[in-house]
Image (spheres, helix red, strand yellow):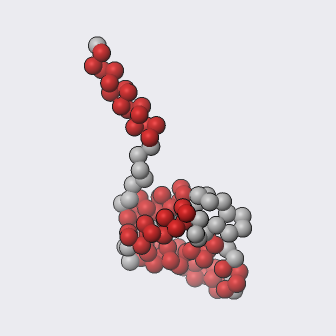
Amino acid sequence: LALENLRDANIFYRELSCELDSTELANLPPLALCPVLLKTCEYNAPDMFTELRHRLQDGDIGNGSGSKPGSNNTLIRLIAQKYFNINPPPNMLTSLLSMFSSGNDDDE
């Protein structure tokens, strides 16, 4: 999905889910999340994506064995930008640096 290839992501998930039984899929939270994420992108539902992202960040879903809270943030951020035009919040450090650098021009 992060590569903007929804068709291949759907095909990959279908083939993978045929290989694994439902118990194995349920024990792999990132894979259990895939059908919801795929449908959200397919139907262009930014509100649902935002809710899903908040639940991921809160640790409600996607944090099974071998998965750290926030470990998928980069991919989720890319999907948000590419499919829903949702940009990440500005970095506070970058904002402060730009504010200070713009203030130096007045001293000359």
Instruction: Identify the residue at horizontal 55%, vertical 63% (top origin).
Output: 58
Q: Nearer the viewer, residue 78 or 95?
A: 95
Name the residue at the top extreme.
108
Tell me the quarter of the image containing the C terminus.
Answer: top left
Instruction: Identify the residue at horizontal 60%, vertical 77% (top origin).
Output: 32
The answer to whether residue 63 is visible is yes
**On screen, 108 above or below 88?**
above
Indicate the position of residue 81 as horizontal and vertical percent values.
41, 59
The answer to whether residue 3 is visible is no
Indicate the position of residue 70 as horizontal and vertical percent values.
59, 58
Left or right: residue 79 compared with residue 98:
right
**On screen, 105 above or below 96?**
above
Indicate the position of residue 67 as horizontal and vertical percent values.
67, 63
Left or right: residue 95 compared with residue 35:
left
Q: Nearer the viewer, residue 26 or 38?
A: 26
Q: Nearer the viewer, residue 63 or 9?
A: 63
Instruction: Identify the residue at horizontal 49%, vertical 73% (top origin).
Output: 37
Indicate the position of residue 68 as horizontal and vertical percent values.
66, 60
Left or right: residue 26 compared with residue 75:
right
* Residue 85: quadrant of the picture: bottom left
Query: Exactly how many numbered labels are in the figure?
Result: 0
